[in-house]
Amino acid sequence: MSASDDFSRPITPMIQAQDQDQDELEVDAQLNENTRSKSACIICGSEFFRMQERNRHVESHLPHSILCPFRGCKWTGRRQWDFQEHWRKKHPGPGQAPREDTNEIYNTKDFVKSILAGEPVEEVARRAFAKVQEGLRRLGKPDVGTNVLGRNKDLREWIRIPSSQLN
């Protein structure tokens, strides 16, 4: 077999087969999107196609888990990406943002699992807030007056603590 024989074979049927496979994959994806079940938040009822999205949403019902370690800064949030943006905009200058483990108040994953397992949200929220207070002490910011609850009005009711401790 010569080198020219390799280039003389038709390739059209292979391309057509790939196009047909791609079409079938797209149809399958549309069917799956329409027929797959939704995961609902057990707290507010919001529905999500992906379990990960639902879990991330359930986390929003808990106190903030990330704190800016910059002296005097009261920023709190839930996502490292948001923290990186905050750091870039509010604390520009030489050097990088701190490592993730230096600004995490507490780890939310176990609390989300507890809520999804059916533990009363009020109890989980209280435990999470206790972890927040512990984390703030560990990070050296026990009295900074951070807004770790964000805009979560339900959480204020669930935890039932004096508002002087919230801000």
Image (cartoon, grey):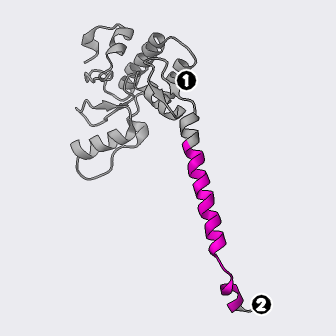
Inspect the image, locate mark 1, and give the three-letter code of the amino acid beneath it: Lys
The magenta stretch spans which residues? 4-30
Using the image as rendered, state which of residue 95 and residue 6 is in the foreground: 6
Using the image as rendered, state which of residue 89 and residue 33 is in the foreground: 33
The residue that label 1 is drawn on is 113
Q: Is residue 65 above or below residue 161?
A: below
The residue that label 2 is drawn on is 1
- Most frequent secondary structure within the magenta stretch: helix
Residue 157 lies in what quarter of the image?
top left
Q: Is residue 19 magenta?
A: yes
Q: Position of residue 21 (x, y in %)?
A: 63, 58
Mark-to-mark CA distance, 1 and 2: 63 Å
Q: Which mark is residue 152?
A: none
Q: Is residue 28 magenta?
A: yes
Q: Is residue 141 above or below residue 153?
A: below
Q: Is residue 81 above or below residue 73?
A: below
Q: On the rendered structure, is 68 left or right of 4?
A: left
